[in-house]
């Protein structure tokens, strides 16, 4: 995996770069649509490529491990082949879902024991097994197994958890370095900074993670309910320490505003379920602000979904129609809103790149942040 | 509306024709995907046109009347504009849904009083109001308001119901002839033969319907649970009477086998929810037989969904992946299966046309019927 910074902003820590995996070149900053269980919900792979132009998508190790399961994924030749996606894939480590979705989970030094939310079966995720699973999934970028602390989180717990996450990281890295990809291409392994909202813990963690000298680095445990100021403050503390010449991935973030602010702090990679999940519920992100399409005011609005077209659905369908579909719980409503929102997110980070290149990023961002948060 | 028979089969009553509405030319026999509430579930209009190549779709008056409602449809300029579908649309009369979906419905001479299944609000559908509603929806082909008798149905009830349906037809035709389309194009009006599984009633009804001299004629009240032999027998009785030079539409039919057998009896138009509804549940229709994709046997089958590709999903996705999506209730599973099944239905009737043209229809049909019913 190669990463090259192409341009740095003079007025912020923002930068644009080029990340190269064996499945293609990714311009950064980049937004990665979430393809939970091998599918970005409601969207054909063809649309992801041709309409949304996603260069990399995310898969959830927890979901994929439970269904279809690693035997099927291995026999198919990995997730790329299984789902017919030739571009890059990043997988998370499953830790987040173990704590948010599974039943009876129990943290031990060895790893996390949990029951499947689907059939109640018992499983263990360890730092080593999660590397093995991601080797089988075949993600271009694998993530270290960590504990993502909730918010709020006591200092003492955050510290104890961080130490465990660091011990797990050492074990996971060992396994990573001892093994190779199964399908003939390179897989990288990103460690994750934790430390909740405590600056000193974040510093300790960022230094530990920086010292690993992996291909890229991630920041976890943010966007879990803390105030946005805390999120930005922690991100800034960490990006100051993480190596400049490696991509920085802020996990699970966030709203369009969160993304622009984090780009300004030097983040290169993002993922979030917000565009698809909120889209399915009728929330549209546009360059003029947020539309709740269920609102009565759109009932007779036959204008395009988004006049500032970022993809085909924006002008193909009108607002009254989309409102009708969402209210009637028609599948097509979820499809349209998801395509629109993902294409908008990807347009937004691409636009940010252009502005970084032209030196206008900070002024543009201030203006956009105000518009993006407006309720239309 | 123009209809022209292009070729008649020598060995059966099958024929191919060309039906022309102000929204385009439709080759018959034709299968019409069901777009219940202004959307063929899980499918973009672009896919309907470019991948599935549907020339006409069906809308349900009952659903559209309740949501988005006729005010919105009128203001949008009709359903074609509302949903951005430039090809032809046929709407049913709402009668079937009033009896199968709504609460507390009550049949009166005037019409049917019912409560919405969505919010319990009370409504009246009359032969006249249903013409008015379909004028507002703007369907190219409107259907008469009838009572679709259930199966089984006592002879006395079937007879009484038939008489009501005929009185309603006279009223509906009167309203049809007194009114015009709202949007500058022609709308036709098809009467519907009823009579349950009673030959004498079907004959009476077919003669009544033939005498109306409308642009096309429909057969209703079949495929409601009666044995297939009864369905074919009633269809044959009726097609012998209905004018040859008008299109014949067999409502709500059916499985691929039902469709081929009915084409042999002289039917030109079909609609059915089976390809989409069964598809969402994991049933795939193929030229080799029926696949229940949830079956364990497809778990590690990485072959294309259908090697006899009728549309892009067939080779783009593999069976194990589709199985995983359907079992995991991923939206994309429903999308893939629906596109496949609709494209297959449309391929099947197109193929039937070719065989009629080349004189091979009957032999081909016998062979296909056997294959189509096979469980793979």
Image (cartoon, coloured by chain):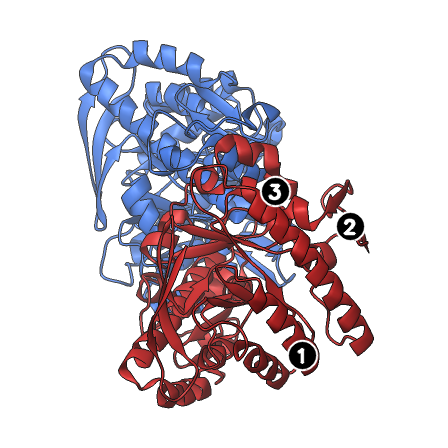
Chain colours: A red, B blue
In this picture, is A88 found above or below A77?
Answer: below
- Residue denoted by label 2: A110
**Mark 1 or 2, closer to the camera:** 2
Tell me how far mark 2 sits from mark 3, CA to CA: 15 Å
- What x and y, as percent, mark residue B56? 31, 44
Determine which of the numbered discs, if any, sits on residue A132 in the image: 3
Q: Quadrant of residue B15?
A: top left
Q: Which residue lies at the image location 31% right of the left edge and 13% below the top edge?
A: B364
Mark toward the start of the polypeptide (1 vs 3): 3
Q: Secondary structure at mark 1?
A: loop
Q: Quadrant of residue A54?
A: bottom left
A310 or A66, nearer to the observer? A66
Dot 1, how many residues are within 10 Å of its Cα: few (below 14), some (14-19), or many (20+)? some
Q: Quadrant of residue A10?
A: bottom left
Q: Which residue lies at the image location 44% right of the left edge and 66% below the top edge?
A: A341
Determine which of the numbered discs, if any, sits on residue A226 in the image: 1
Tell me how far mark 1 sits from mark 3, CA to CA: 33 Å
Q: Which residue lies at the image location 39% right of the left edge and 29% below the top edge?
A: B206
Query: Same chain, marks 1 and 2?
Result: yes
| Image marks 1 and 2: residues in contact by CB distance under 8 Å | no
| Image marks 2 and 3: residues in contact by CB distance under 8 Å | no
**Mark 1 or 3, closer to the camera:** 3
A345 or B91, nearer to the observer? A345
Mark toward the start of the polypeptide (2 vs 3): 2
Dot 1 falls on which chain? A
Q: Quadrant of the N terminus of chain A?
A: bottom left
């Amino acid at each position: 995996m190669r990463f090259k910074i192409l341009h740095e902003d003079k007025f912020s820590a923002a930068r644009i770069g080029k990340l190269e995996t064996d499945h293609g070149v990714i311009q950064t900053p980049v937004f990665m649509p979430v393809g939970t269980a091998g599918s970005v919900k409601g969207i054909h792979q063809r649309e992801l490529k041709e309409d949304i132009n996603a260069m990399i998508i995310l898969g959830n190790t927890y979901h994929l491990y439970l269904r279809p399961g690693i035997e099927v994924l291995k026999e198919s030749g990995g997730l790329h082949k299984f789902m017919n996606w030739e571009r890059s894939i990043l997988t998370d480590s499953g830790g987040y879902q173990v704590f948010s979705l599974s039943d009876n989970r129990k943290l031990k030094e060895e790893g996390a024991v949990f029951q499947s939310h689907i059939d109640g079966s018992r499983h263990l995720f360890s730092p080593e097994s999660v590397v093995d699973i991601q080797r089988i999934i075949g993600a271009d970028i694998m993530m270290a197994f960590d504990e993502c602390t909730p918010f709020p989180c006591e200092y003492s717990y955050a510290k104890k958890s961080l130490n465990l996450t660091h011990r797990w990281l050492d074990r996971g890295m060992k396994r990573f370095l001892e093994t190779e990809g199964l399908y003939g291409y390179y897989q990288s392994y990103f460690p994750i900074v934790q430390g909740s909202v405590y600056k000193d813990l974040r510093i300790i963690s960022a230094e530990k993670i920086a010292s690993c000298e992996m291909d890229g680095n991630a920041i976890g445990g943010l966007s879990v309910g803390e105030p946005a100021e805390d999120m930005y403050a922690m991100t800034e503390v960490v990006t100051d320490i993480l190596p400049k010449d490696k991509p920085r991935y802020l996990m699970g973030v966030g709203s369009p505003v969160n993304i622009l602010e984090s780009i300004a702090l030097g983040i290169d990679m993002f993922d979030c379920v917000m565009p698809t999940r909120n889209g399915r519920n009728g929330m549209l992100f546009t360059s003029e602000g947020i539309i709740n399409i269920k609102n009565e005011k759109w009932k007779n609005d036959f204008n395009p979904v988004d006049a500032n077209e970022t993809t085909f659905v924006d002008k193909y369908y009108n607002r009254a129609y989309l409102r009708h579909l969402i209210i009637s719980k028609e599948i097509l409503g979820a499809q349209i809103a998801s395509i629109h929102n993902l294409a908008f997110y990807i347009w937004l980070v691409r636009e940010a790149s252009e502005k970084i290149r032209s030196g206008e990023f900070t002024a543009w961002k201030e203006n956009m942040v105000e518009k993006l948060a407006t309720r239309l």
